[in-house]
Amino acid sequence: MNNVEYNSEKIREKYKNLFKYSLDYIFVHDMQGNFVDANKIALDGFGYTRDELSNLNFNNILANRKELAKAIKNMIEIKEKGRHFHRTEYKCKTKEGKIVYIETYSIPLKQNGETYAVLGFGIPITERKLAQKRLKESEMRYRNLFEESPFSIVILNSKGIIIDANPTLEELIGYKREFIIGKPFYTLPMIHSEDLSMVQERFKDLLNGREVHRTELELKRKDGSLIWTQLQGSLLKFKNETHVQILMNDISQRKAAESLINKQLKKLRELDQIRKDLMIRVSHELKTPLTLIHTGVEYLIESDRVKMNENDKEIISMIERASSRLEKLIENLIDATKIDYKKLRLNKQKVDLVSLIEEAIEDLNYLIKKQNLDLITRFPNELITHLDELRIIQVITNLLLNAIKNTLPNGTIELSLEKKEDYIDFSVRDTGIGFTTEEIKQLFIPFGKIERKGAELEGIDIQGSGLGLYISKSIVQLHGGDIKVLSEGRNKGSKFTVRLPNN
């Protein structure tokens, strides 16, 4: 120690408050790197006792040769220049071999003008170093993702100036990063002037913490071509400063597909409108000659001046049935068109639903008898509710007619009406041909006529437009109700249930 002995009592007396009260590491080492004194905090920090202090030197404390060289260099600086000019970080090791970091600052201890030892002050910075390491690793990972991302990424500061951009952006807009970095985004030529105020508003919203949804923006590339992009922004914190990160994705192909789809949809809507207009026009035009046919048939039947044999009467009867069927079809076409246009209106009034059902049965009784069907009814004496009488009897007639058509001769049809507190259920059950799962899916769609063939269908009336059930369901839904159908399959019958609100 250059023939000067370290006086522990003298040094501790001089720096007694430091050794006694300091929360930092206090230590003394000679000019050969041997430790001669330390406070309890320093000893505990490295896991040594005071008795072990006399055997400690730089090799025991410093983690590697690089740290040892750093310590020797600083010691020489202190000796030659009389002071330590800066704080130094050291990578150290504890008695158990655990790596720790300390930041030190040292002053020389002199006697007769000669530095014989160094008094050091250290603070543990292991947590800080680990946090810095994690931050650096995180920044490296982010940088790798930033550079390799398939999305175009732009980083802006709070003033809207671009401070970074990744290579993918260059490919997207055709400009080099050097061209846009350092410039406010609102001065860039790729943003259309008419979009600028909207983009600035979204940027302000983002900075102020308001939710900003994904934005679609058309950009002008360097070569003059246009490209559709989708922008998504988020806030980033760098060194306590707020930045905005913008992810940009090329959606030009999607926008082109959407444009094509919209054009096709427009054409389809136009065609659908033409179809609806044609249905209305044709339906009304057919009514006039049909009225003349009805009038002519009635004249032939009632006129005494026209003599007809049995064959003539059969032909007249056939004409009457065909015109009635045609009239029904025209009425259905008109109703279906009104539903499409949402112009079908209800005229609700207080009616007895039981009387309506009985009226429908009476109108179709000739068909029931013709098929020799057993009709079972389960009704209360009366059931008063508010309905559109004309439209609901249309529904009842359609459902009863549907059951008659789909039930073989000598089968059974059961009608029931049940009143609950909030609703009314009217059911039509038959023992007829039934429906498959696929057939049920077609029942309530316009022109959803089911084409069925086979020997088991002999005796089944397959005529119809495919509009009756569609119209019936629409009428029920306008009343605030619905129609459900159940069938276990072919030849197992079916059950239609109309549920209406009880009001």
Image: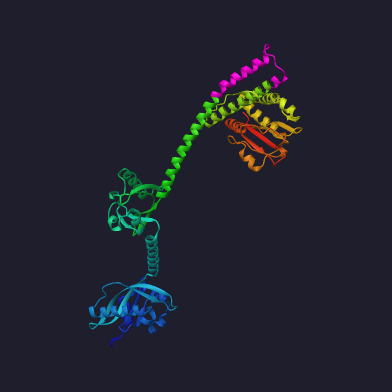
Q: Nearer the viewer, residue 243 or 312?
A: 312
* Position of residue 219 in the picture relative to residue 424 (left or right): left
| Residue sitting farthest toward the top | 305
Residue located 57% across and 29% down the image: 333
- Position in image of residue 114 (x %, y %): 24, 83
Give yes or no for residue 313 being in the magenta stretch.
yes
- Position in image of residue 423 (x %, y %): 64, 32
Residue 399 can be seen, yes or no: yes
Majority SS type along the magenta span: helix
Which part of the image, by quadrant, shows the C terminus? top right
Give yes or no for residue 492 being in the magenta stretch.
no
- Position in image of residue 35 (x %, y %): 35, 81
Q: Nearer the viewer, residue 279 or 386?
A: 279
Relative to residue 190, is residue 319 depicted above or below? above
* Position of residue 192 in the picture relative to residue 371 (left or right): left
Q: Quadrant of residue 428?
A: top right
Q: How many marks?
A: 0
Residue 422 can be seen, yes or no: no
Question: Which color scheme did the rendering employ for the protein?
Answer: rainbow
- Position in image of residue 444 (x %, y %): 60, 36
Q: Nearer the viewer, residue 112 or 269?
A: 269
Relative to residue 305, is residue 452 depicted above or below? below
Residue located 61% across and 17% down the image: 295
Q: Quadrant of residue 135?
A: bottom left
| Residue sitting farthest toward the bottom | 3
Which part of the image, by quadrant, shows the N terminus? bottom left
Magenta span covers which residues?
285-314
